[in-house]
Structures are given as structure tokens and as C-alpha cells.
Amino acid sequence: MVPVLLGNKCFIIIIIFEQEPIESWRNVNGHNLLDLLYTDKDEWLRAFENYVLLTRLMVQTSKPKSSSTTVQIFERSLQSSRYCFLEQGYTNNHIHGADYAVLDQWYKWARANHDISLDLIVYLRCPPEVAYERIKKRGRPEETKIPLQYLQELHESHEKWLMSEDSSNTTPVIVFNVDTTIEQVQEQCKLNEDKILGLDKREVKNVDEESKEKIKKTLKF
């Protein structure tokens, strides 16, 4: 929960951060799809992306545990799966045309039958070489097989989707250059807090000084 006081305006933001369902990908009835993917993309990318579409759809369409949730933040989205990871796999011949067409139809069905829309995309822009070193430092076992070239290809897919003039994306984008320290990234977040939390579009009510002090004491800040 994030209490926000701006001048004489006060409102409460309850944020839910939805991480990628990595553990689901690691155990599909005993099968580690994440490991299989990085072992042989040509063989397993189709199955992996099918399951990723399913799990991301479940995450993006599930109701928050708290009915008071104001903002949901997704680590990645169905849109990034479709326009980055699927495109990268098809462009680099890891999946064939028929597989690509089936996965594209899955995405179109999800978009037509569920509300998977996004209000904002925060693009954490990072050179592939920096991401590669961070992945090695993270030490996730399945990712030891990831070559730098794969990250370079994914970077190109993200650039095409979010930064190119002919991009099909219509969602507003904020770009953070994250080949910096964590403190500098946090500062970028702070400077863009209103946009990220939707405060620039949220209708707020005036609060008198007495009420504002009561709110501060209640929330202990």
C-alpha cells in the first residue's frame, strides 16, 4: 500500500506486482519447460510459448486477491510474449510458419475475448552485454545455456516493438535506461511515479489539514 499526499490532496494506492510465473514453467507435470527451451529452442520453443501464453493470460485476467487493489504491475505481459519472444523465435527460424500462425491466433483470441489491455509500458532498456552479465550473476540454473546472441536478438525485438517508427504498439511507453546503479534506476522510478501509478489521470479530492493529519497518523508516515 502506498499512501500519497500531494499538497491538500490525498489518496491511497494499493499496488500488486505480478512476477513471471517461473515456477509454473519449471514444473509442468514434472517437465521443466524452461530448461528444455534453453537446451533446444528448435524443439521446445513452440510448446514453451504455448504454455507461456496460457500462464500469462491467467495472470493478466485473474482478479487481484484484494478488491481494493488500485494498480497492477506485470513483470512481463502477453503483449511482450507476442511481439518480442514469438517474433524473435520466428525471425530466427526456431519455429515454423504454421506454429507461428497458431500462436498468433491464440493471442488474437485472448485479445478479443479478454481484457488484456495495458495502460502503460515501462521499458527497462539495457544493453544485451549488461543483461548477459546480470543473468550470470543471478545464477538461475536453466539460464546457464543462454548465449549472448539470444539476448541481442531479443533486444532487437524489443526495440522494434517499442521504439521503431513503424511499431504496432499503441500503449504509452516510458523508457528507463537501466545499465546504471540500482539507486539511479530508483531515481528514474521516483521521477516518473505519477505516470507509473496513474496519478496523472486519477481524480482526487481536496482534504483539509485536520483530515490530512489523521491520515498521516493512521498510516504512520
Image (cartoon, grey):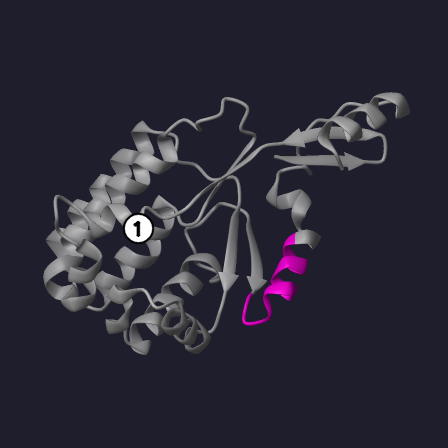
Q: Quick check: can you spot residue 216? A: yes
Q: How many marks?
A: 1
Which of the 4 quarters of the picture holds residue 203? Answer: top right
Q: Position of residue 175 (x, y in %)?
A: 56, 59
Residue 219 part of the magenta segment? no
Q: Quick check: can you spot residue 96? A: no
Left or right side of 27 for 151: right
Q: What kind of element bears circle 1?
A: helix
Q: Nearer the viewer, residue 15 or 122?
A: 15
Q: Which residues are magenta?
A: 178-189
Left or right side of 70 for 74: left
Q: Residue at x 35, y 66 (%)?
A: 154
Q: Residue at x 38, y 69 (%)?
A: 135
Whether 165 is drawn above or below 52: the answer is below
Which of the 4 quarters of the picture holds residue 111? Answer: top left
**Quadrant in which the C terminus appears:** top right
Type of secondary structure dominating the magenta stretch: helix
Whether 143 is drawn above or below 70: the answer is below
Disc 1 residue type (three-letter): Ile
Check disc 1 and report the residue beneath it.
22
Whether 160 is drawn above or below 129: the answer is above
Left or right side of 43 for 116: right
Q: Position of residue 37 (x, y in %)?
A: 18, 61
Q: Nearer the viewer, residue 202 or 217?
A: 217
